[in-house]
Structure formats: C-alpha cells, structure tokens
Image (tube, rainbow, N blue to C red):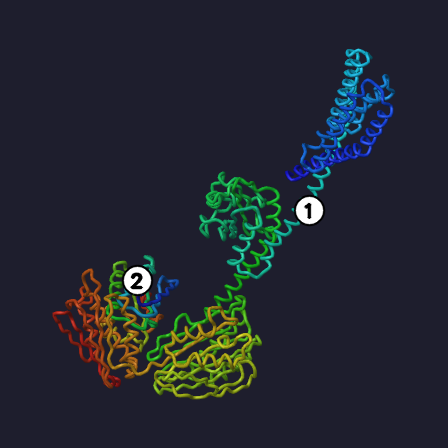
Amino acid sequence: MTEARELGVRKRHGSDFGTGEAAVSGAVRELAVVRVPVLVLALLAVEVAGDGATHDLFYYLLAGGGLYAVGALGLAFTGRGPALPWVLYVGIDIALLSALLYASGGGDSPIQPLFVLLPLVGVLSYSTYWTAVVGSVAVLDYLVVAAIHSAAEGGPSFGSILVFSLFIGLGTLGATLPVHAVVQRQRAKAELEQRTRLLAEQAARAEAEAVAEMVGKLQRITDVTLSHLSLEELLPEVLGRIVEVGRSDAAAVLIAADDLALRASSTAGLDAVRSGARLEAGQGFPGRVAQTRQPITTAARAEEDEISHAFAEQGAGSLLGVPLTVDERLIGVLIVGAGDGRELGRVEADLLRLAADRIALSIQRAQLYEREHFAAQTFQRSLLPARLPEIPGLLVAARYMPAREEARVGGDWYDVLELPGDAVGLAMGDVVSHGIRAASTMGQIRSAMRAYAFDDESPGGTLTKVNAVMRGLDQRETATAIYLALDLAQWTFSFASAGHPPPLLIDPAGSADLLEAGRSVPLGAHPGTRYPEAVERLEPGSTILLYTDGLVERRGNSLNEGLERLVSEATGHSSEPEPLCDRLIGALLGDQPPLDDVALLAAHVVSVPDERLELELPCMPSTLGPLRRSLRHWVYSVRPSRDELQDILVAVSEAATNAIEHAYGPVEASYRVEGWLARDRVSVTVTDSGSWRERRGLDRGRGTAVMRELMDVFEVSHLEAGTVVHLERRLGSRSAA
Amino acid sequence: MSTRADIHTTSDDEGVVIARISGEMDTSNAARVEDRLTAAVPNTALGMVLDLSELSFVDSSGVELFFRLAERFEDRRQRIAVALPEGAPIERVFEIVRFRERLPLVGSVAEAGALLRADSL
C-alpha cells in the first residue's frame, strides 16, 4: 500500500520533470534556429533602411539582449550558469523586446496585434506557470515598446497604452484560468486513473507474491511432517519452523487427552511453560480454541491460563490459537504469539489453519506409531531377564541395544539359567523378522529352550527339540540361537549353535578365540535337524561372550571383518564382563545406535581368588547385600555345598548386623570383614569399633544362637578397640548329617 | 541400596491374604517389608499366609520381623501361617530359632490357608 503510493508520487514527479525538460530544450532549439536568424535578418533590414528615431535605442537593446542571450546560453550549456529556464526567459524576453521595438518602429505596425496571441503560447503549453511567464513577458514588453513609441513620436498616450496592456494581460489570465482549471482536472483525473491502475497492479502483484509466499511457508512448515519423526522430534521441529516463517515469536502445541484436557507438549520461544503443564477441558484460551474448533485471536494479557501467561511473559501479546483436528477428532491445539505490537490476523490464521491440518495428521501418525512401538518394545523387554541371577563363581553381564530404526523392534534375546547342580545355562537367539511378531516368536522359543534345558537336556538335544517345536508354530519364522551349558564343578562347557555367530572364548591370559564348532542350521529351517554339540574346557579366569550379529555386521563391511575386529578388541584386555561389554560396544558400535538390535552376554568364570578376604565397609545396613555377594564369590573356590554356603552367609550377615547396630556417634563408623580359606575350612572375622551388646527385644540372643549353631567356631572377643567376632566353618563335615 | 525383597499379595474369597516374599531379607529391608505386609492385610481379613518358598536369604532380623508381625496380628485377632517347602534355603535358620514354636509352619500355601480357615471355625 505504502509502496504503491510512493511509486505513484515518484512517477508523477518524473513526468512533470520530463515535460519541463522537453519545453526548455524546445525553447532553446527555437531560440537558436528561429529567433536568432530572425533577429539577424531584422538587424540587416534596419541597416539597409538606415532610418527611424528609435534606431539608437534599438541597437543598444539588440546588442545587449543578443550578448545576454548568447552568454546565458553558453553558461547554461556548459552547466555553470543559473537555472536554464529563468535565464532563458530573460534572453527570450530581451530578444522579443528588440524585435518588437524594431517591428513597431514604423508606427502602426501590422504585427502589433499579434502580441495578444503571445499568452496563447503559455495556454497551449498546458502550464499555468508558462502561461503566467509568457503572458507577463508579453504585457511588459508591450508596455515598454509603447512607452518608447509614445515618448519618441507622440503616438498614443502612455495611459491608453497602460489600459490596453492591462486589458491584454488580465484578459489573457482570465481566459487562461478556466482553461487551466479544466486541464488540471483532466490531468488530476488521468493521474488518479494511472495511480489506481498502478495500485491495482501493485495489489495484484502483492497478492500473487503473498500466495506464493504462503505456499512456500506452508511447504516449509509441513514438509517436516512428511518425515517419519517421533513425536518428541517432530513437534519442536514444526514449532521452530512456524516461528521462523510466520510472523510470530513463540509457539506451543498442546496435545488433547481423551477427556479433552490439554497438556503442553512442546514449545518454541517460551521459557516459562513447563512441559506437561495441564489445562482441564475448556480451560483458558487453549481450552476455548479446543471447544470451538475455530481459529481464535486474543490478547495474551486478557487470558488467565498458564500458557497465555507464558506467552505474555515473553512479550508475545497477540495470540492466535488454531485447533488441530483429524476427521473431526481433536488432536490438540496450536498457539502462536507475536510481540512488538504486531497483531496476528486473518492472513496468519489462514496460513496456520492450512498447516494445522497437516500437523494434526502427522501428530496422530506419530502417536499411533509410538503406541504400537511402545507395546512391541514393552513386550520384547518383558521377555529379557529383569535381572541376572547371582551365581557363585560366575560373573555375568548383559547388554541390549535397540536398533536405530526404532520401528524395528527386534527379536534378540538372551537368558541365564541356574540349573540343578553346578550347571548354568547361557542362551541367546535372534529371530530374523522384526516387530511384535518377532518378539512373540522370540518369547516362544525362549520358553521352549528354558523348559528343555531344565529337563536336563544337553545343548544339542535342547536345540533339536526346540527346532521340532517350532515346526508346530503357526508363524513361519526362523531364528538363530545358541545354547551353552556350563559345568562349574568340572570346569567345562558344552554348546550347540543354530546358525548363530560363534561364541568368543577369552582365556585367562587374555587371548580370544571364536568357537566355530557345534554349528548347524538356524531353528525353523529344517524340521528334522539333529543339532550337534561341542565341548570345551572352561578354565577359571576365562570369559565366554555370546552376541547377536548386530554387533559385528556393518554396512559396507564383510562379516569376517566384523568378527576379526571383535577378536582383536577382546584380546589382551580385562575380561571382567561389565567393562568387557562396555568396551566392545564402544569399539564396535561407537556412539550411534546400531542398525540392528544388538544383544551381548558375557560370563566370566571367577578365578581361584586370594585365600585372604579383606573388606572395610561403612556401618550401614545397605552393605549387607554386597557383603554377601563378595563372600559368595570368595568362598566359591573351595567348593562349599549349597547348605555350607548358606550357613556361612547367614552367620557372617548376623555378625555384620551386630557390628552395624553397635556403631554409634555422628562419625561414620566402619566395620572390617577378614577371611581365610583353607582346603577344608573357612574362617571369617568381623570387627567393629563399638562394644558388644546383645540385641534387645524379643530375639534376645537369637542372632548369637544362629551363629553358634551354624558355625563350628563362634568366639566373641571384647578388645579395647572394639569387638571381634570370629567364625569358622569346616567343610564337608556335615554333608552326611 | 537396601537388599531386595519383592512382595506379591493376593487374597482369596474367604478373607485370607497370601503374601509371597521373594528375594533376600536382612536388617536393611526388614522394616520396609514389615510395613508392606501390615498394609496388605485389612482389618476384615481372616489372617495372612506368608509364602516364603522364594525367599533365598533371611537372618535373625527377618525372623524377628515375622514374630513381631504375628504379635501385632494377634492383637487384631488375626493369625499368620507360614508356608515353607522342605529343603528351602532358609529352613535351617528357622529350625535354629525354633520358628515352629511361635508360628504355624507348614509345607505349602494350601495347607497354611486351610489351617487359618480351620482355626476360624
């Protein structure tokens, strides 16, 4: 609008200026081509005639005027003189005067009446200015000429000449003004028309540009909705773009719950809204937008709700709320706010409304997707062990890394089975397909494998039966699987693999080997397969690693390269399961989530530990659990029976409980546990810094009774530094009892 | 972090609450277990069956808790029966503290439930 007006103004200036220039250059041309030759000719004529009373005056004027005209023109052309038109008028004037004087020299000259016509030159130029100039020049010239004549020859009196010339001048002006009024009106009308046309053009162009711009903005906002982003990624991206391309400073999306309550889900440019802020159905400005399902604009200050307040705090005074709906169902509400006194209006509402349809669809899609994905993932996770069993003599660690492509909930699983006797089962598998179906297959295979493993089956027998069971399953799925049965008494393990990547065995010296034996086709490939098994030695201090192919498969690399990397990364480092898993994941997968799901299971056979156990623990009940775990691993190397192990754990736990309860004072006290292992004997002392007391209450002496009964030696020494409880248990002595 | 014990409670039609404790019990979690067991039994219930078949470790502070709990229940005219299958890892501790003399100790949840119902007649 403003631009159009400015353009019109500039245009009019331009055209006037152009006309003026043309008039001046025309006058100059005329002067040069017509007036000068005429003057020269007149001069020659006067010379030839050589007569008349006005000759002297005429010559002076002619000479002065000619010089002036030539000088002024020269100056004007070289650009150094005063403004050309003014100089020109004077030059023309003097030249005219000279010509008049000469022409009227002979008394009643026939050209005298022609002076009346002079102002017409101005009238015809359609310019009040020119008319006034030429008219006044003519009147003035005529007056001068008449005055000269009357003085020299006693012609008409000066008074009559004056009246005549005034008559001509005023008459000219009188005739000119109405003409000019008409001309001005016409010109104004033409100008108005031109301006209107320009404005119309301008408006049309602006509208076309605005439409193109809006389409572009819409495109920018919505193209992000086409990508398969999770809700968490989608909303900030969409809001960021809305703020960027729209005339707004802040934006928020509130997602509607089933009861139409709104929950702030994502914001851009708003610090104050805590994510998850909740508005009841119909509450506040967003609630109104949700209820009416119409775009609404409002002033942030006029609203009471938390969201509007947050906009107001950020200086976004003008709010626009648009409902997000899909098929009449309210998905949520989109709010944008603009600051700096800008008002959000129809244009923004139109844009947002268009965008809102697409945003609503993509939010709905993301919600559905997330729900489904969450269900599949929850199901799959529920099939993995919540915590690994604590097995004396074996340290176990496991990792599960979900795939980068979140939609692909994988079918990887692992399992650790505490079997009767000294046997431990390690299982891992990978169902080929993905999604909830894969997770379901995985659950079935896992259950079958557990059942057969507990049924005292060898690894080969277990896989053979699981494979037979799979034939009966409806879904035609295949899976790789591996099952290892560890014998911690004999320090051996047997294993069978159904097309699974080979297990990695790291010996106590740190050298790593892939075990290629015992491998056959995947489960579900051939119904009647009999799975062979292999047996290996399991030396104390060694580690077994099971993994799924996601760990070693990389785009652009062969499987062999991946396996080689695995071996080299596992070689020569600590084979404690937890750090081993971390290191392998870091080295083989990096920081990025893997392309496929990855499962890792590492089991480390505890090497024969030091005969001495020395622990210093703070006097806190929470140390009891870890103390028992340490004891378990420590005692394991002398192979206590389960009963013997349990007795030792209970007795030491009782002594430690006493030590913890005797601790007093604000200073954090600690207690010490020391142990000695002999082939047939376990000794433990628990030392505290307090004085020995029986626990009060109902149990009077119950803890003591337990220790005395369970141990072969139970002694309490009251030393100055504290109390020492000495416990000793002979091994094998009671097994018959 | 205290020792982990999970408690799973169910109740039958006749007002017997069955609480299955799995994991380990020592002085670090005894109070918490006690609170949760107390809260699990409404005043209207007949009594509680403690299913300890999945309890892998208990020491005298755990035993103490059961005795305290039994006393409190007796004040409310409610009874506790304990189910512990033969050969369970905690059996020896129960023997030493003469658990059987304080509380009815039977081999299965069904037996314990039957005991409570029979007593109420």
Structural crowding at the residue carrying mark 2, measured as other residues with C-alpha within 10 Å and reported as few (<14), some (14–19) or many (≥20): few
The quarter in which the N terminus of chain A is drawn is top right
For numbered disc 2, what is the local secondary structure?
Answer: helix
Image check: A629 left or right of A138?
left
Give the residue pinned by disc 2: B32
Structural crowding at the residue carrying mark 1, measured as other residues with C-alpha within 10 Å and reported as few (<14), some (14–19) or many (≥20): few
Q: Chain of mark 1?
A: A
For numbered disc 1, what is the local secondary structure?
Answer: helix
Taking depth in this image into account, of A417 and A377 the one nearest to the observer is: A377
Taking depth in this image into account, of A160 and A605 the one nearest to the observer is: A160
Relative height, residue A306 to residue A549 (above, below): above
- Looking at numbered disc 1 in the image, what kind of residue is underneath it? Ala
Image check: A492 left or right of A213?
left
Q: Position of residue A472 (x, y in %)?
A: 55, 79
Taking depth in this image into account, of A697 and A134 the one nearest to the observer is: A134
Q: Chain of mark 2?
A: B
Tell me which corner region of the image, top left, top right, bottom left or bottom right, holds residue A164: top right
- Looking at numbered disc 2 in the image, what kind of residue is underneath it? Arg
* Disc 1 to disc 2, C-alpha distance: 73 Å
Taking depth in this image into account, of B64 and A692 the one nearest to the observer is: A692
The answer to whether tags 1 and 2 share a subunit is no
Q: Position of residue A671 (x, y in %)?
A: 21, 69
Give the residue pinned by disc 1: A208
Tell me which corner region of the image, top left, top right, bottom left or bottom right, holds residue A575: bottom left
Q: Position of residue A238 (x, y in %)?
A: 55, 54
